[in-house]
Image: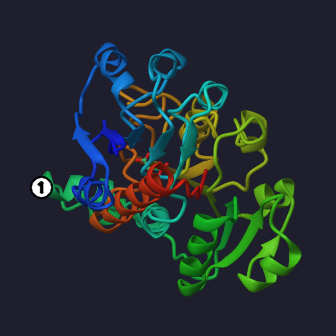
């Protein structure tokens, strides 16, 4: 019997290739291909395993005549054209849990970095300034953290924030009252969250409902001195409006791991007071990358070898 053939087209922990091989698939690792190169070779493969660098367009799908499954080692599948995949009968899978803790920890790190202005204090100290009187932080203890999105990652952030003695409120239309009680958060509407939160952190995918959820209008409804963290998806916040509110001092700090356009090589936010950012590192820990690589390879092999479907 011919073995199913899988292409890994993004840098991925080597455990993925090992699992594919052990589970009876043939595997090629070809990273850094141009879209034309991918289009030229994708016709050979039954499975395509990706992270975030490969964009799977309708053109790639049309050329993928044998393709049965695309596996995203991570949560978001924004880099895959789902309607095109579905129209060609290609199953798209993600790994919704493998990097949740890591992403939640990044959001908590951002909250702490904002509260104490650690990046700027570090840069100026290393530049020889010793600027002790320039930095006055705030405690997070007793502060209200507003979660926009209380799903898998949001719930982990809530638990960590409660450990830091924060009061957690959450806006999430999918959060049931029972689950809110279970995770110890107060379910509120968006207006209430905007008015009450000292820190806001976003943990929702980018959808038609969530796009620009922190619009200029909604940002203007936030409490003066709010600090905002986004380790979820670019496009959830109006970046130009956020830059203006940082400049005016209404927003006391903002930390973004994600931008509407990535890579973000320029932004109205760059250089604003108390703005810090990282280059979409939310899932970048050794542990998370091993987890998502193992999960994606197991799920894809299950499908290709036995027809089992999970997280599609
Ligand atoms: C994800 O969707 O899993 C994260 O944003 C990680 C990433 O894209 O690198």
| Count of numbered marks | 1
Q: Is residue 222 left or right of residue 254?
A: right
Q: Is mark 1 within 8 Å of ligand 1?
A: no
* Residue in the image at 70% along x and 42% along y: 214
Q: Percent position (x, y) of residue 113? A: 40, 63
* Residue in the image at 41% along x and 34% along y: 270
Q: Is residue 281 left or right of residue 122?
A: right
Q: Percent position (x, y) of residue 21? A: 26, 55
Q: Is residue 208 left or right of residue 310?
A: right
- The answer to whether residue 136 of the structure is visible from this angle is no
Q: Identify the residue under disc 1.
A: 128
Q: Nearer the viewer, residue 271 or 305?
A: 305
- The answer to whether residue 72 of the structure is visible from this angle is yes
* Residue in the image at 37% along x and 17% along y: 39
Q: Nearer the viewer, residue 109 or 129?
A: 109
Could you say which quadrant of the image residue 243 lies in? top right
Could you say which quadrant of the image residue 63 lies in? top left
Find numbered disc 1 in the image and state the secondary structure of the residue it sits on: loop
Could you say which quadrant of the image residue 131 lies in? bottom left
* Residue in the image at 28% along x and 17% along y: 37
Q: Nearer the viewer, residue 205 or 4?
A: 4
Q: How is the image coloured?
A: rainbow
Q: Is residue 243 above or below residue 146?
A: above
Q: Percent position (x, y) of residue 208? A: 75, 35
Q: Residues within 10 Å of mark 1 (few under 14, many from 20)?
A: few
Q: Is residue 102 above or below residue 306?
A: below
Q: Nearer the viewer, residue 152 or 244?
A: 152
Q: Is residue 288 left or right of residue 310?
A: left
Q: Percent position (x, y) of residue 75? A: 52, 52
């Amino acid at each position: 019997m011919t073995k199913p053939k899988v292409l890994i087209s993004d840098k991925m922990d080597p455990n993925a290739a090992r699992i594919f091989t052990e589970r009876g698939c043939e595997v090629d690792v070809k990273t850094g291909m141009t879209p034309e190169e991918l289009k030229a070779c994708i016709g050979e493969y039954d499975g395509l395993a990706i992270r975030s660098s490969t964009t799977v367009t309708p053109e790639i799908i049309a050329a993928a005549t044998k393709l049965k499954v695309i596996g995203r080692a991570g949560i978001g599948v924004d880099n895959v054209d789902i309607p095109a995949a579905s129209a060609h009968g290609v199953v798209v899978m993600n790994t919704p849990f493998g990097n949740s803790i890591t992403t939640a920890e990044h959001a908590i790190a951002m909250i702490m970095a904002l509260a104490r202005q650690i990046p700027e204090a570090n840069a100026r100290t290393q530049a020889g300034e010793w600027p002790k009187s320039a930095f006055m932080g705030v405690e997070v203890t007793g502060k209200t953290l507003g979660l926009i999105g209380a799903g898998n990652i949001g719930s982990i952030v809530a638990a960590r924030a409660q450990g830091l003695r924060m009061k957690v409120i959450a806006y999430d239309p999918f959060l049931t009252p029972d689950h809110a009680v279970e995770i110890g958060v107060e379910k509120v509407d968006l207006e209430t969250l905007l008015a009450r939160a000292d820190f806001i952190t976003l943990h929702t995918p980018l959808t038609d409902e969530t796009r620009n959820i922190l619009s200029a209008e909604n940002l203007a409804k936030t409490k003066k001195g709010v600090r905002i963290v986004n380790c979820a998806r670019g496009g959830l916040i109006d970046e130009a409006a956020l830059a203006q509110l940082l400049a005016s001092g209404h927003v006391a700090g903002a930390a973004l791991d994600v931008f509407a356009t990535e890579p973000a090589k320029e932004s109205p936010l760059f250089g604003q007071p108390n703005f810090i950012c990282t280059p979409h590192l939310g899932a970048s820990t050794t542990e998370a990358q091993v987890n998502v690589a193992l999960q994606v390879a197991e799920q894809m092999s299950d499908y290709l070898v036995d027809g089992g479907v999970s997280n599609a």
